[in-house]
Structures are given as C-alpha cells and as structure tokens.
Amino acid sequence: MNRFIRYIQRYKGWFGGAAAICLLVGLYTGLLVSPPDYYQGEVVRIMYVHVPLAHTSLLAYSILFGGSIWFLWKRDPLVDNMCQAASSITALFTGLALVTGSIWAKPTWNTWWTWDPRLVSFAVLLLILAGYMMLRRLVDDPDKQGIYAAVLAIVGGVDLPIIKFSVEWWRTLHQPMSISTRGISISDDLLLPLTFMSLGCWLLFAYMLMVRTQMLYLIELLQAKKGRLLSQTHFSQSAQ
Amino acid sequence: MTGFYARWGMVGALGLLLVFLTYQDYQTRLSTIPLSGIMSGNTPKEPIRIQGMVKSGTLAGKVEQGEATFEFTEGTVTIPVEYHGPPPENLRELKVMVLKGRWDAEAYVFKAQDTALVNNYGYVAAAYGVSCLTIVLMLFAMSQRVMVLFKEIKESKLYEPEVDSLAKKQ
Amino acid sequence: MPFLKTIQWVVWKDLVCELRSRETISSMLFFALIVILVFSFSFSMDQDAARQLIAGIIWVAFAFTGIIGLGKSFSSELQNDCLEALQVSPIPKGAVYLGKVLANFLFILSVEILLFPLFILFFNLDVVAELGLLLLVFFLATLGLSSVGTLFSALTVQIRAREVMLPVLLLPLAVPVMIAAVEATRGILNGDPYSFYSQWIQLLVVFDIIFTVVSFWLFELILDS
C-alpha cells in the first residue's frame, strides 16, 4: 500500500480532532457568547458559518488548481485521486456557502436571491465544478480522465478571477452597490467566532480531503488487485 | 467495525446533546412570553421578554434619556409600559420589538429595563442545520466507505506486498 | 514542417472541407435564423424595447451558433480516424490548435457578419454609426469564444455525450466574454461615448490573450493523451 496513504491513516485523526475542537469553540462563541448585531439582530450569526464556508471553498479550489498542475507535471495517480476528492468537497462547500448565503439574504435583503457579484461568482464556480464532476464520470479511460479533468480545473482556475471582475463591473454598472456592504463592522466580538470557525473549516477540509483521497485510492487499489487476482487465476487455469 | 459505529454513535449523541443544550439556553435567555401569558399572574421573578408593537399615539416621555411610557400591544391584549433604562435607539411608534423587564401586577404596569430586536432564529437554525447535517452526512459516508474498503482488502488478503509473494514462490 | 506553414495547412484543410460540404456554416446559419424567429415570437417588441434587449439576443444567438460550429470542428475529424492522424503526425500540436482556432474563428465571424444585417432588419434598428467598433467587438468576442471553445471541442470529442458536454463546460467559462460582449454591443447600439464601454473591450483583449496562451499549452496534453 502506498506510503502516503498509510501516513494519512495514521495522522488524519489529529486533523479531525483539531477541526472538531475549533468548530465546537466557534459554534459556542458564535451561537451563545457573541452579542446580536445592532441592525441584523440574531441573523448575523449566519455569518459565522457562511463566511468560513465561502473562504474554505476558495481555498479548496486553489488546492484543486495546484493539484491539477502538479498532476500534469508529475502524473502521480495519487495526486489525481486528491484532485478528484478536492473537487467533490469543493462542490459541497460552495453549495453550502450559496445555500447559507441565500438563507442570510432572506431576512436581511428580503429576497432569497439577488444578482450580487459574489453570489453570481459562486454560482458560476459551482457550475464549473458540476461540469468537472460530470466530465470525470463520462471518461472511461483513467489516464485520459485525470488529464481532461486537470485541464478543465486549470482553465477554470485561470478564469475565476476574470469572472469575478467582470461580474463585479457588470453589477456596478446596472445598480449602485447599495446592498453590497453587509452593514457590519468587524469588531472583536465577531472576530473570535469567525477566526475559530474559519480555522475549523480549513482543518475540516484537510480532514475530509484526506479521507476522500484515501477512499478513492482504496477503491482503485481494490479494483486493481481484484483484476490482477482474476487474471492470475485465469492464467493458472489456462496453464493447466 | 463496531468500534467505528460506536465512535460515530458517540459523535451523534454529542451532537444531539449540544443541540438540546443550545435550545434550552435559547428558551431561558431569548424566548419571549406572550402578553396574555403574563396577565395570568404566575410569572417568574426574574426579567422576562415580551414581544409586541408600540401602540400608535401613546409614546410619551424623554425617549432620548431613557425614560418613556407607552402602551404595548399584541393581538387583542394591550398593556401599559414604563421604560427606564439605557436610551433605546429603536423605540418609536408602530415598531414591533422585544422588551426585557418585570410585570408589576399590583401597579398593573410592565417595568421594562431594556429593548431588544425581534429575534428570528429560524433562519439561523436553518443555515446551521443544513451545513452541519450535509457535512456530517458526507463525512460519515466517506469514513464508512474507507472502513469497509480496508476491511475488504484485509479479508481478501490482497494487501500483501508483491515482494513477499515473489519470495514465497522462490 | 515549420510552425506557420502547419497553421496554414490546418486552416486550408478546414476551409476546403467546408467549401466542399458547406455543412458547418449552413447549419449554423439556419440555427441562428431559427433562434431569431423564436426570440421575435417570445418578445413582442417595439423599437425601444428592442434596443434594450437586442444586445443580449444577438449574443445568445451567436454563442449557441458558435457552439454548433465548435462542436463540428473536431467531430468531423472522427471520420476515417482523421483525429488519430492528427495525433500521430509529426507536426507541432500547438500549430494544430492555432489553425483550428483560426478556422473556427473565420466560420463564426462570417456567420455573425452575415446575420447582423438580418437582426437590424427584423428588429427595426437604426443603422449603426460606429460599425468599426462593433466589428472590433465581434472580432474580439469571437476570438475569445473560439480560443476556449476549440480546446474544449478537442476535449469533449473523445468522451461520451459530447454534444451535451461542450456547452456545459464552455458556457460557464465564457461568462466574462458574454458579459463584456453584451455590454459593449449595447453601448455601441445605444450610441454611448467610447469611454462608457472601453473597459469591456479591454476585458475582451485580456481574456483573448490569457486564454489563447493557456489553451495553447494545454491543447498538447489533450491531443497527446
């Protein structure tokens, strides 16, 4: 078994535990200790889960981007597994950031969806990730699958900043950014849960990435070994 | 295998306990009592929270200095309120808000000490619930799959390194 | 074979194929005509409303016609294993990419230039004063669409469900091109001063440069695999 997979099996628990502790502290301070916002009231607590999720999904996409370049350079199948794992987890975090953002928008802006630049950029990111995962399913040859997916991830990663800028310009052109500021100045009360939740989300992402990479690697390993076993029995039978 | 499910069972139980504790804390600290409830007389001595609307044309007193009297209404029930506390910035007529204070049954007046915004915890609970549930479900599915795969590889004795099998043959 | 010569041969090959079969351009033209018809049924427009909506309609029609052309660009190579011939032939793969981009660019741009008078006719628009700038926008946006589109056309041609996957992968990535093209076209059709939409033209130039370079490098990996 791959050396790296054994390292993951040995050390992933630390990441999971650290993530759990950070998230528990973050949830406690965010839900119970920190005061409600003056304008938004209790709804401001959605920020403590929404903002870390959004940050983490961007971090996760940059890891997918870097991993894709690495894969195209070294062609390490384990890195391909990591990219595939990162893509589904990034999609999960992006989707959750969109959903929590939508839930936050309802009480503050009185609408479930607004063409806010950040929301639009995240929706486009989610579409790119959905395309990535569909592409993975539609290519049977594992070598081609990794290369095609990496190409898509790299083009998407180069495109994302341009999408963000263009969408931002487009929105400022059509309506003044009256609702873009969330009406919150970040004070110490808000900073404490936000820090813990962000840290917890990053650690959680690292932990999930490890588990999922392990999962994809083990699936391939089992398939490969079963295939070899089958071919071995076939060979021995035909030899007899 | 049982260890895996025991661990996840503990995580689930801990999660449920935390949700329950948070809900209780919310009930004691932040839930409001209906106006008709405080009239029945069996209200506790500690400050309570009531929600309603400031009745139009009844607000009087020096609101900027934190002294005011007004009538507070919810549905068909209306009670008089004496506000005495920090200057309330969002106290005005026809405003739906939450008051913290005590009900004085003898004087038939609600002595308010502080104001608060109407809390709508539904959105917060929805946001946290959706995120936590989805992440935990995905994590559980992944971990279970890894556990099963490890077990499968072990049981079918497929994990043996190539070198060993070669050595045996020789 | 030198680099420029290869580009020239690839473009020449595609143009000759097209001149003999007239498949791509005619199907793109008919599709675009149908799109125009459908739009005119769905929005009953006077001239004011038309001026507001026309930029968006033009670019929706052009993007979908472009996707038809891009999809044909590599699926036509599947006949007689021409794609494998391209893969194994000892020519720089980057040149194949640039040749394909150029050919696609020429097809889409010619369809756009043929269609634009029809838009003016059907939607009762005033004749545009700044035709040169409008052509520049068409030029830049088509180049951006075909530079990314050629890469993904080569990628999707080798997988299952390629007709669906090309728009699914291409359109989210082409969001900046669409926004910039629509905004610049609207500005030109409204007769706004140049400074109102100059940023969109700059964005198109930046997009074209970045994605031609990035796709140029990535294309080799796709064709070699």
Image (spheres, grey):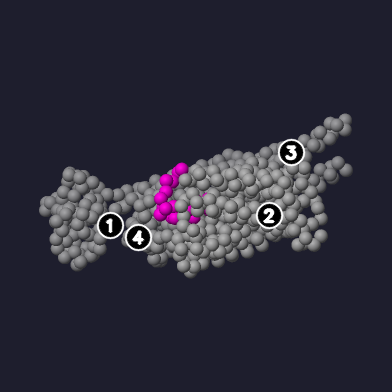
Marker disc for residue B116: 1
Number of the front mark, 2 or 4: 2
For label 1, the crowd category at 10 Å Cα-Cα, with few meaning under 14, some 14 to 19 and many 20 or more, is some
Q: Give the residues in magenta.
A: C41-60
Q: Work out how far the residue at label 2 is from the one at label 4, CA to CA, in angstroms.
A: 58 Å
Magenta stretch: dominant SS? Answer: helix
Q: Is C165 on the left-hand or right-hand side of A19? A: right
Q: Work out how far the residue at label 3 is from the one at label 2, CA to CA, in angstroms.
A: 48 Å
Residue B163 position within the rendered picture, expressed as x and y whole percent measured from the top left: 81, 47
Instruction: Give the residue at mark 2.
Output: C103
For label 2, the crowd category at 10 Å Cα-Cα, with few meaning under 14, some 14 to 19 and many 20 or more, is many
Q: Is A142 on the left-hand or right-hand side of A26? A: right
Residue B38 position within the rendered picture, expressed as x and y whole percent measured from the top left: 20, 47
Secondary structure, mark 1, is strand
Residues tagged 3 and 2 counted as in contact (Cβ below 8 A): no
Q: Chain of mark 4?
A: A
Secondary structure, mark 2, is helix
Rendered image quadrant of residue C105: bottom right
Residue C140 visible at all: yes
Marker disc for residue C64: none
Instruction: Give the residue at mark 4.
Output: A37
Residue B131 position within the rendered picture, expressed as x and y whole percent measured from the top left: 47, 49
Residue at 74 percent of width and 54 percent of height: C12
Q: Chain of mark 1?
A: B
* Residue A188 painted magenta: no
Q: Earlier in the sequence, mark 4 or mark 3?
A: 4
Instruction: Give the residue at mark 3.
Output: A226
Q: Work out how far the residue at label 4 is from the one at label 3, CA to CA, in angstroms.
A: 58 Å
